[in-house]
Image (spheres, helix red, strand yellow):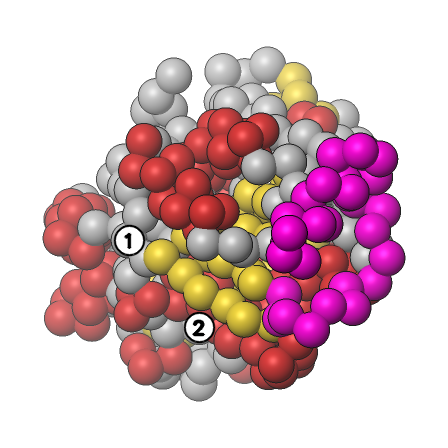
Amino acid sequence: MNRRQLIASVAAMTTISLALPAWAQDEPLKVGFIYVGPVSDGGWTYQHDQGRLAVEEEFGDRVETTYLESVPEGVDAERALTQLALAGNDVIYATSFGYMDAVINVAAKFPDIKFEHNTGYKRTENVGTYDGRFYEGRAVTGTIAGRMTQSNKIGYIATFPIPEVIQGINSAYIHAKKVNPDVEMRVVWAYTWFDPAKEADAANALMAEGVDVILQHTNSTAPLAQLQQQGKIGFGQAADMASFAPTPRVSSVYNNWAAHYVKSVGRVLDGTWQPEAVWGGIGDGIVAIGEITEAVPAEVKAEAETLRDNIGAGEYHPFTGPLNKADGSAWLAEGQVATDEELSGMNFFVEGINAELPQ
């Protein structure tokens, strides 16, 4: 019986696999990742891989990491997760919402392996979740968008009508509207996380409607490339995308997954890992605002940075009433703050967004 089999047997007898003492074996901890896009996407997957590299830098030869990229959601994800499990990985990170059921299915077959699913909500004894409060960053970029638009039309390239995406659209619109009461928001649903051609088409469709500032929740730099050609502006998404600065990318909302991965792997190594629900924002260092470039007037930059700092300090919440739903019904009263439960199930636009929300 080798060491890995011995650990599995002990865990099965005592059912205390999550309470194992600090990782003290001579073999490195094996850490696997599955990515929905290519590492070279310059956005979502690129930034997750930066987190993987940070784990290697932090723990050196105590860990051994690997990844599978461009794994479609669904059956292919289950196959990829099983491949990583059979390869002997001790902890596996699945980095897209659509991997959720695949993670639960595979985790049930490998109870001694720890899994974490990014942006999901299903947890078990060996499955944790981790997510970012992206809506906090959208409040900041929405503020800049509202100030910078000349046409009073801002656009949003959305992926799928899930709460995470709807939160971002609402937050961006609320804060654009606060600084520019005349602003309108157009939304295009791309139904993909990563498809540069579709993302480019979405950007062009928005600009054809007169939109001159675009926010996106898709993962590639294709929208910024289209904005650059037409002299419009936008924001980096998931990663800093600074290669497009100072324009068309005037700032960005990016994810610092390294902060989570280093902490999570450290807990596996010291035996304190638990299947938690992590939802971190600006104050936790998981959501960040990239450099606001000189293309943005100084007073707008200062306004955006103040908002960022207030959110990070917990002094302001982007979903603070009064706010109504798009159908005119009341949602949050004056000064009332949305709960995490409400945000986690958000399935409506706020009042003022005149766009289709697929059900």
On the image, the x and y values in percent for residue 213 come to: 32, 58
Q: Amino acid at mark 1?
A: Ser
Residue 26 on image: x %, y %: 69, 73
Q: Quadrant of the C terminus?
A: top left
- Between 30 and 228, which is closer to the camera in this rendering? 30
Residues packed near mark 2 inside 10 Å, few (<14), some (14 to 19) or many (20 plus): many
Query: Secondary structure beneath disc 2?
Result: loop
Q: Amino acid at mark 2?
A: Asp
* Residue 219 drawn above or below residue 161: below
Give me the residue at 54% from left, 71% from top: 64
Asked if residue 157 is positioned above or below residue 144 in the image, the reply reads above
Q: Residue at x 72, y 41 (%)?
A: 9
Q: How many marks are shown on the rendered structure?
A: 2
Describe the element under mark 1 as helix, strand or loop.
Answer: loop
Q: Determine which residue is flagged by label 2.
A: 240
Q: Which residue is at a point 73% across and 58% down the rendered structure image?
A: 268
Residue 134 shows up from this direction = no
Could you say which is closer to the camera, residue 239 or residue 182?
A: 239
Position in image of residue 355 (x %, y %): 34, 29
Give yes or no for residue 24 being in the magenta stretch: yes
For label 1, the residue is: 70
Q: Quadrant of residue 321?
A: top right
